[in-house]
Amino acid sequence: MKVGFVGTGWFAKTHASILGEMNGVNVTAFCGTSMEKAEKEARNWSNATGYTNMEEMLDRQKLDAVYICVPPHSHGAIEYALIERNIPFFVEKPLGMNELPNDIVRKIKEKGLITSVGYHWRYKDTTNRVLSLLNECRVGMALGYWMGSMPMVPWWRDVQKSGGQFVEQTTHIVDLLRYLFGDVNEVYAAFNNQIMRSKVEGTTVPDVGSVTMKLKNGMISTISNTCILENYSKVGLDIYTDEGVIELSNDLLRVVKGNKVEEYKEETNPYLTENQIFLDAVQTGDPSKILSNYQDAIKTHKVTMAANDSAATGKPIYLG
């Protein structure tokens, strides 16, 4: 199986290194914003070539699948070219900006193309354990958080290119909420830029925010985020039930029932799992084990876009 990459950043490196350990998978192409970046990644592979033009890459190589690992504002032409050529693709979150993914998903459906989106929390053992625990209790609400620092890449702090923290990072927690509890009906958000615009030149993204959501099942959830911190990180979802509290973080699950606390550490690499499942789907033509395809991921995208709209207008957004 021959696989190509569009993008040369952290996610491209992470996925490519995993693919490099798989039998029968050959990474043969990297498309970057410069030939220097593309060739630097290609040199890590015996049969890989660097490109700066994706159409040229697709013309010269017969690829079985392509990984899209680019910033939010760079989506569009990449997906359209792959859809036109019927090439299955794995795309890292978020799907893009504004309404663009709505058109992309329509074309994907028309082609019946296999896709996977990098919402890796769905593939965690601890997340699967939470799904089992939810069969034993009734849930009232959930509180989520993505509290950390600002990634020091210029596009991230530009709201026109990244969409802001809730779109670019906290989308993982929104998707986790949806995966565990179903879809969102209503979104109300409050964002502000308190600190970072005076500390980092060119910052237009909000650096603090909270988003309250009503789910179709009756639950209420609030997910907050900030990027003002330096050496601290708190990421996860706390679930409040009639049996106690379920606390799911990046590598640990805590189940609190009265005075009893049980802890479970994440035992597997969800990035490995999502890659294995996607490539198996491409080989077999059976996508049934993919937990987040483009058609599902766009529902998470719409929630994050609604949060931006609500913060801008000061009004709740109804998703129906």
Image: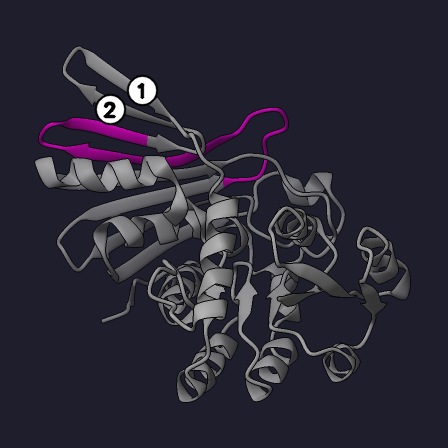
Residue type (three-letter) at the residue carrying disc 2: Val
- Residue 11 lies, in percent from the top left, at 64, 51
- Residue 179 lies, in percent from the top left, at 30, 53
Identify the image quadrant of the C terminus. bottom left
Q: Residue at x 64, y 63 (%)?
A: 161
- Residue 100 lies, in percent from the top left, at 52, 78
Q: Residues within 10 Å of mark 1 (few under 14, many from 20)?
A: few
- Pick the residue in front: 238 or 41: 41
Residue type (three-letter) at the residue carrying disc 1: Glu
The answer to whether 71 is drawn above or below residue 108 in the figure is: above
Question: Taking 284 as reference, is 242 left or right?
Answer: left
Identify residue for label 1: 263
Work out whether mark 2 precedes mark 1 in sequence or the reverse, and give the earlier one: 2
- The picture quadrant where one finds residue 5 is bottom right
Q: Residue at x 83, y 61 (%)?
A: 38
Residue extending farthest to the top is 259
Give me the disc on residue 121.
Answer: none
Give me the disc on residue 255.
Answer: 2
Residue 96 seen from this side: no
- The picture quadrant where one finds residue 148 is top right
Question: Taking 188 as reference, is 78 left or right?
Answer: right
